[in-house]
Image: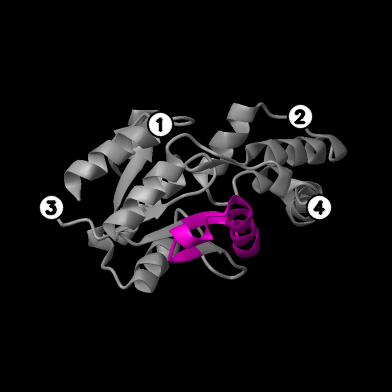
Amino acid sequence: MNKIEAVLLDMDGTIVDAFPPIIRALNQTFVEYGLPQMTAQEVKRHTGRGDCSMISLFGDRREEAGKRFLEIHDEDYLDHINPLAGAESLFQWLNEQGIPCAIVTSKSQSRAEAQFEALGWSHHVEVIIGKIDGRPEKPDPTPVLLACEALKIKPERSVMIGDGIADMKAASRAGSRGLGLCDSFSIAELTEAGASRCFNSLSEIHQWLIKEI
């Protein structure tokens, strides 16, 4: 087993809860386009699958619906972002150990950076790899590979922590080890997607990393 030299992390549902504005904006857009609304759990599962799963629900109107969704979302998204339990202590411990961290998210680059700044977390990570037009997203391995390149670490010497199917597929395809955080998806679903191990909380992952690093 390769030594862990870097830790990559997803954002929404993994280290932060930023879903309220996503759910509100998506359901308002659904209403405006005459589509049925979704429960919070349904939104989280669509988000975790990647491949623009939510926006694809609008069919031929996906481009204009996507713009409308972002208009609504951006009204107050920085006011509704909360750290998940164990995230701050995990970052602090990794920093103390000298283990470089990167964020790999399907959120746009500018929004991810703005949320990290709002949380006061920018100093915790070396790089944020977010969504940029024209660049493949998770579950494509490209974002994971770019994060490892930025950290000057081989993918096989990294772990990727995430709660979504897309996180585990991207990690596996890049050669990183996926650490699945069970919430919206089951152990079976995350394992099938490529997770090396699955956990019920960030605290559990933290304790496992203490033993492995």
Q: Which residue is drawn at 81% across and 52% down?
A: 71
Q: Label 1: state its secondary structure.
A: loop
Q: Position of residue 115 (x, y in %)?
A: 62, 54
Residue 93 or 187: which is nearer the viewer? 93
- Where residue 23 sits, quadrant-wise, is top right
**What type is the residue that disc 4 sits on?**
Glu
Residue placed under numbered mark 2 in the picture: 36
Give the residue at the far front of this rendering: 96
Q: Label 2: state its secondary structure.
A: loop
- Where residue 131 sits, quadrant-wise, is bottom right
119 with respect to 92 (left or right): right
Q: Position of residue 124 (x, y in %)?
A: 45, 58
**What type is the residue that disc 1 sits on?**
Cys
Residue placed under numbered mark 4 in the picture: 71
Q: How crowded is mark 4: few (under 14 residues within 10 Å), some or many (20 or more)?
A: few
**What type is the residue that disc 2 sits on?**
Pro
Residue 41 or 114: which is nearer the viewer? 114
Residue placed under numbered mark 3 in the picture: 1
**CA separation, marks 2 and 4?**
20 Å
Q: Where is residue 157 in the image (x, y as percent from the top left)?
A: 23, 60
Q: Are marks 2 and 4 in contact (CB under 8 Å)?
A: no
Q: Tell which circle, 3 or 1, labels the residue nearer the N-terminal end.
A: 3
Please state the extent of the stretch shown in magenta in the rendering: 104-128
